[in-house]
Image (cartoon, rainbow, N blue to C red):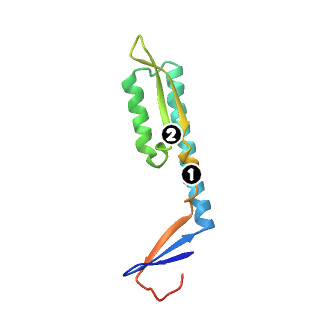
Amino acid sequence: MKKVELEDYVRILCLSEGREEKEEAMDSLKEQRFVNDITRIKNSVTKRNVIKINKVSERIGRIRERYPSITHYYDINLILDEAKPEVLDINWIKKASREERSTLTGAYVIESSHKHLTA
């Protein structure tokens, strides 16, 4: 814990191992579900069930809405057929910032007007 005194209040930075484990478990579950859903769309494109650009983009958009805390850590690319407006394949890449996020996992801040208390 670290105490930072400001004008009218105090902020205390806390690092919790229990909270870190909980947040990592929640994030990994969301990430696993996100990858599973993207893989389902990829399989549909591979089987040629869904190939129109607007339909594939719509499905990806729904996944982005469902997992907003995970999607900004991934780049999703559509591989298009230049002759026809169709999707040939989908690929996704995990950004390096996903690994950097883990440094803040388990940290939280408490604000208090009780400046006389210790951290």
Query: For the residues marked 1 and 2, what is the alpha-carbon distance in whole angstroms?
Result: 13 Å
Mark 2 secondary-structure assignment? strand
Which residue sits at x=42%, y=13%?
Answer: 82
Compared to residue 102, the image places residue 50 above or below, namely above
What label does residue 74 carry, if any? 2
- Where residue 55 appears, as percent x and y from the top left, is 38, 26
Q: Please identify, in this view, whether the residue under mark 1 or under mark 2 is nearer the observer.
A: 1
Compared to residue 8, the image places residue 83 above or below, namely above
Q: Nearer the viewer, residue 6 or 46?
A: 6
Q: Tag 2 or tag 1, which sits nearer the N-term?
A: 2
Compared to residue 109, the image places residue 68 above or below, namely above
Image mark count = 2
Q: Which of 81 and 41 is in front in this view?
A: 81
Q: Is residue 105 left or right of residue 6?
A: right
- Residue under pointer 1: 100
Q: Which of 74 and 9 is in front in this view?
A: 9
Which residue sits at x=40%, y=12%?
Answer: 84
Report which quarter residue 2 is drawn in: bottom right
Q: Residue at the top extreme?
A: 83
Q: Quadrant of the C terminus?
A: bottom right
Q: Quadrant of the N terminus?
A: bottom right
Q: Which amino acid does label 1 sit on?
A: Glu
- Where residue 18 appears, as percent x and y from the top left, is 62, 66
Q: Which amino acid does label 2 sit on?
A: Tyr
